[in-house]
């Protein structure tokens, strides 16, 4: 941690204690990366705009009414825990000064914006790194910091990243059905994962060398990097891969199947195929079925699929899942929120927990900290907070700003 200043976290915890992150992006892709770090013990300072804040994500998704009269989105309550929230106008000269003072006390700065935004404010990478040469900077943008000029200024959201990155071309059923986005906000969450791992990789390097660096993370590239062998298949085989629904296409069973009372996913690879044959009453030694597992479109492959679907539809989801798993065949119900809330495995692993949300003024329940560390576990020490909630705390603690100066900065609209 820069300058060895005492942490604002009441009781330090987790594998990232001692790491201080300044976060100034909006919505999901970058701020969620910082929030994941905060749940692992990093000290995260989140900057929002004065007055309006991160208005879209604070209020957009499934608004919840608090006992104190506040309304906060469910996504904000889930994703903005453990963070210190301040307001700061980075476009104002005084805001730039405050920002550079904060940067000197941080290990990582991550942001999301259209390239050139911070440069216009006098906060180009050279200026920021001059203030703190050990700083790791992670720029998150839709199309990257350099490239074709027609793309760099374009706006991007989760939906756009999924389209340009190639994911949406593969999700959904074949034409004439339309492509289907992965939900919820999958392109943003993928980008957040790339943001946090790359920022921490840069931090490790800075600890070893004493030198910071700049990370250029394009959302579409994060999404694109999850497409497995799609591009190798194109370049080497000429395969222009398209949507094929839930089925794997190259082996079976690997698909969603309708039962009496819901849907079940079944996946059997290699020896698992013979186990499926036995369960549904087909002879694994019969040569007829030998190629049905991999020659999906053959007459035998089509017949096998029909027999399996007939077997599944005559049973409940519970019966199918229990029977197949007892035979060491991977199968799961397609879980709803209600299913997950009532499932004994979720309960025994303590996946869903309660915490105190300051925005709503009461306890809430949602998903806890993931993954689980044996020696330095993460935790939730507080929930989300109102706009500018930590202004006085952060600015006085780190910058020595007096209450009188804080009032002046508020009057000037800087915070």
Image (cartoon, grey):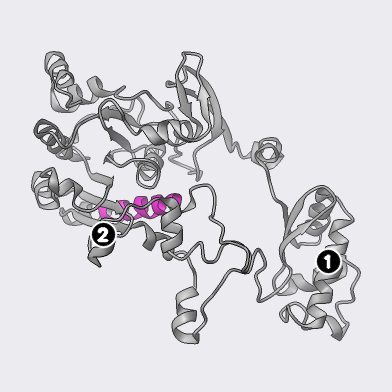
Left or right: where 328 falls relative to 82? right
Q: Splitting the image into 4 quarters, where does residue 24 fall? A: top left
Q: Splitting the image into 4 quarters, where does residue 54 fall? A: top left
- Which span of residues is magenta-colored? 188-203
Q: Residues within 10 Å of mark 1 (few under 14, many from 20)?
A: some
Residue under circle 1?
308
Q: Nearer the viewer, residue 76 or 169?
A: 169
**Picture layout, residue 163 above or below residue 97:** below
Q: Nearer the viewer, residue 260 or 116?
A: 116
Residue at disc 2, secondary structure: helix
Q: Residues within 10 Å of mark 2 (few under 14, many from 20)?
A: some
The residue shown at (52%, 66%) is: 169
Residue under circle 2?
152
Regarding residue 322, the answer to whether it shows in the image is yes
- Disc 1 or 2, which lies upstream in sequence? 2
Q: Nearer the viewer, residue 319 or 188?
A: 188
Left or right: where 244 falls relative to 241? right
Left or right: where 169 falls relative to 267? left
Q: Position of residue 125 (x, y in %)?
A: 14, 51
């Amino acid at each position: 941690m820069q300058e060895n200043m005492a942490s604002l976290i009441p009781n330090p915890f987790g594998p990232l204690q001692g790491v201080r992150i300044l976060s100034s992006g909006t919505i999901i892709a970058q701020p969620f990366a910082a929030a994941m770090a905060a749940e692992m013990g990093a000290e995260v300072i989140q900057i929002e705009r004065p007055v309006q804040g991160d208005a879209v994500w604070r209020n957009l998704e499934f608004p919840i009414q608090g006992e104190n009269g506040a309304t906060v989105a469910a996504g904000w309550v889930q994703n903005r825990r453990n963070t210190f929230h301040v307001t700061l106008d980075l476009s104002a000269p005084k805001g730039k000064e405050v920002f550079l003072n904060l940067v000197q006390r941080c290990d990582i700065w991550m942001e999301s914006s259209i390239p050139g935004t911070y440069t216009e404010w006098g906060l180009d990478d050279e200026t920021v790194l001059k203030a703190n040469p050990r700083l790791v900077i992670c720029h998150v943008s839709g199309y990257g910091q350099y490239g074709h000029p027609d793309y760099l200024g374009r706006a991007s959201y989760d939906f756009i990243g999924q389209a340009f990155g190639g994911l949406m071309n593969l999700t959904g059923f074949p034409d004439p059905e339309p492509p289907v986005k992965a939900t919820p906000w999958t392109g943003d969450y993928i980008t957040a994962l790339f943001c946090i791992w790359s920022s921490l990789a840069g931090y490790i390097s800075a600890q070893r060398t004493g030198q910071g660096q700049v990370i250029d993370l394009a959302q579409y590239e994060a999404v694109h990097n999850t497409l497995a062998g799609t591009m190798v298949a194109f370049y080497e085989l000429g395969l222009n891969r398209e949507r094929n629904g839930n089925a794997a296409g190259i082996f079976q069973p690997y698909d969603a199947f309708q039962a009496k009372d819901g849907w079940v996913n079944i996946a059997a690879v290699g020896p698992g195929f013979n186990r499926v044959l036995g369960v549904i009453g087909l002879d694994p030694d019969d040569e007829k079925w030998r190629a049905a597992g991999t020659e999906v479109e053959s007459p035998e492959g089509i017949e096998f699929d029909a027999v399996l679907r007939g077997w599944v539809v005559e049973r409940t989801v519970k019966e199918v899942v229990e029977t197949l798993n007892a035979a060491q065949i991977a199968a799961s119900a397609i879980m709803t929120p209600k299913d997950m809330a009532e499932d004994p495995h979720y309960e025994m692993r303590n996946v869903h927990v309660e915490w105190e949300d300051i925005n709503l003024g009461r306890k809430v329940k949602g998903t806890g900290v993931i993954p689980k560390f044996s020696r330095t576990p993460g935790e939730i020490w507080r929930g989300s907070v109102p706009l500018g909630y930590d202004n006085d705390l952060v600015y006085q603690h780190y910058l020595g700003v007096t209450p009188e100066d804080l009032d002046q900065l508020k009057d000037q609209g800087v915070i």
